[in-house]
Amino acid sequence: MHKSLLAAGFTAILLTNPASAQTLNVATAGDQNMVDYIKDYLGPMFEKSHPGVKVVAVGTGPGDGGSQKIFEKLDAQKKAGANSDFDVVVIHQKAAGTMVKDELLKKYRDTLPTGKLVTRDTANNSLGADVSGYVMPMFHSQTAIAYNPDLVKAPPNSYAELSEWVKKNPKQFGYNGIKGGMSGVAFVTGWVSAFGGDAAKLETGPYDAATKATWDKAMSDLKEFNKNVVITPGNAGTLDMLNRGEIAMGPVWVDMFYTWKAEGKLPPNTRLKLVSPGMPGQPMYYAVPAKTGQEKLAAEFIALATSPEVQAEGIVKRFNWYPGIDAKNVQPKLEKADWDKLFVDITPEALAANGKPFPIGPYFNDILETYEKKVAN
Amino acid sequence: MTRPSFFGLILIAPALAMIAALFLYPLGFSLTSAFTVPGGGFSLTHFEKAIDLYSTDILFTLFIVITSTLLTALFSIAIAGTLTLGETPWLISSLRFLYRWPLFIPFIVAAQCMRTFLAKNGLMNNSFVAMGIMEPLQATSFLDWRGIIITFVWKQVPFVTLMLAGAMASIDRATIEAGRNLGASRLRVLIEIVLPQVAQTLLVGLVLSFVTMLSVLSVPMMVAGSQPTMMTVDMAFRINSYGDYATANALGVISYAIAGAVAWIYLRHNVKREIAA
């Protein structure tokens, strides 16, 4: 089935995109803003410095599903012995681990001039998989609780306080479950880290299939908790409901929150709180497929994308993401106001203390599936 | 009967090949994947898992689709009946003009509109409040099972009405006139004379609507939160989050079974009629 579908997809791409000598195909998972970022910002910049090159951005869909599609395509092309028609891929953590394991990616980072600017642990360890050298973080994004200070005078500081708050204020907290986007998933994995026992083990392993049995209490509490919350339709659904005043609090992606606020789609006084013991965030990675015809161009594209200038102007200023390379390289390139904007509600200290990675792959899946079994069904 | 001609077979060959390649092969593939474990061997593990995790969602799906089908039937009969038996020309012409619009709007666009229309502080409730019909505090959100049903019915009524009104227009007017002359009310004429003559068409329209609604992903995903949700969302989630095609296929097979049951009801009814005729 996959092959016939892919063949049809190929035909479509070939028909719409007459192959010029120098086309750099960038496939990106994630929301539309990722495609826009490459199409409207990065692509034109790269085309300017590389005359005759055309950057084509393809979006494969939000969430892990988008990365899964990229994986399936590269995998099918590898099995067919064909060159991949993606030259640069932008993927989530979970898929990065699988793709490195299946040898679908090139080990390219050490050849990049910007490779040594990366310091975060997530550049080497992707949900427990060693991806060192194969990926460059594009940005880091973080989840936090957004709240309306008119309705919530004293926002909760921790998951435990939040749980109490929800009991006293039923139907004022909303999140999107686990099937409507990653902000809900982040809230749930954060819940399990907070109440499920050994949080450090979830982040670093080793994996033990018996661990999920210890989450029963946390999951049944979450089921109780859910009775007093609103399940929203999607990441944007939570923000929409905050905007219309239908809920007073809910977990959101920090970058989406700032972007919506800047566009006037959220009340200007809405604020963020990163509760303890922590909520997860994740990077998106730039990677190069193992069999691409445009290896050199791909590397140059990623070097540009991870340069301090682009990280400052594109990642931090325009899209409100945290930089993928070490922030101290980015700070000098930014106005103080732009820098501060990202760190007003969530201080660098709070981010360091409460910004957690997602649990490693197998625990991540266990958490989702236990949630489906014990909480949702 | 004549033997099938060689050229006839060649003529339908492309169509047959399309069905085999684009429908039968994927169907076989999905059945195989649902009933086997890696390494081969027949197994019901994936079904156990599907039931274990999604039993509520399966019931929820049935509830949504059956309720929507019944409501669709009700509204379609009302609209088609008005078009056929109505005696107010301007009402009929404006209804005829209006009712088809949702046909041209894709599910995903309908879902997007409903998302802001039906919200607690959305367009609908705000309009009611502004008109003084409702107090702001009474406003509730319809973005749950009710929202899904409203969207489905809104979208499917024109389709069924289109078929039904066509069928009603082609029945012998004399039967209607006879009923009216003998003093039957229009409602009675609709129920006792018109509907029995177009029941077949109504059934076809409803079966097609049922199957369509069973397969829509965008509406449950966009209109309602995910607990509980419809099976299509679960299938997408199984694939997107776990790359687990087997359980998704098991859910797919359950969907086929539901759609198959409805098709069976239709076919049985059809055969009965043919025997009677």
Image (cartoon, rainbow, N blue to C red):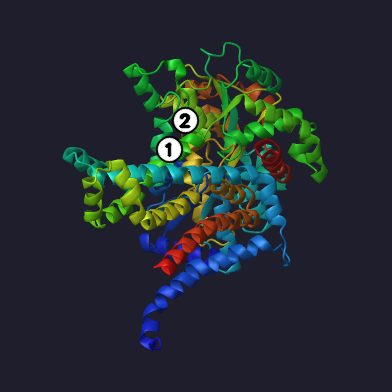
Chain holding disc 2:
B
Q: Disc 1 marks which residue?
A: B150
Quarter of the figure that contains the C terminus of chain B: bottom left
Q: Position of residue A262 (x, y in %)?
A: 43, 25
Marks 1 and 2: CB-CB under 8 Å?
yes
Q: Position of residue A271 (x, y in %)?
A: 53, 19
- Residue A275 to residue A219: above or below: above
Using the rendered image of the protein, determine whether residue A8 is visible from the camera's viewpoint. yes
Q: Earlier in the sequence, mark 1 or mark 2?
A: 2
Query: Is residue B272 rendered to the left or right of residue B54?
Result: left
Residue type of the residue flagged with mark 1: Ile
How crowded pointer 2 is (Cα within 10 Å; few <14, some 14-19, many 20+) is rated as many
Q: Nearer the viewer, residue A22 or B229?
A: B229
How crowded pointer 1 is (Cα within 10 Å; few <14, some 14-19, many 20+) is rated as some
Q: Look at 45% across and 52% down and name the residue there.
A: B212
Q: Position of residue B204 (x, y in %)?
A: 40, 57
Q: Nearer the viewer, residue A56 or B22?
A: B22
Q: Which residue lies most toward the left here? A: B89
Residue type of the residue flagged with mark 2: Phe
Q: Nearer the viewer, residue A105 or A188?
A: A188
Task: Quote the CA–CA distance across marks 1 and 2.
Answer: 9 Å
Quarter of the figure that contains the N terminus of chain B: bottom left
Q: Disc 2 marks which residue?
A: B142
Q: Secondary structure under badge 1?
A: helix
Chain holding disc 1:
B
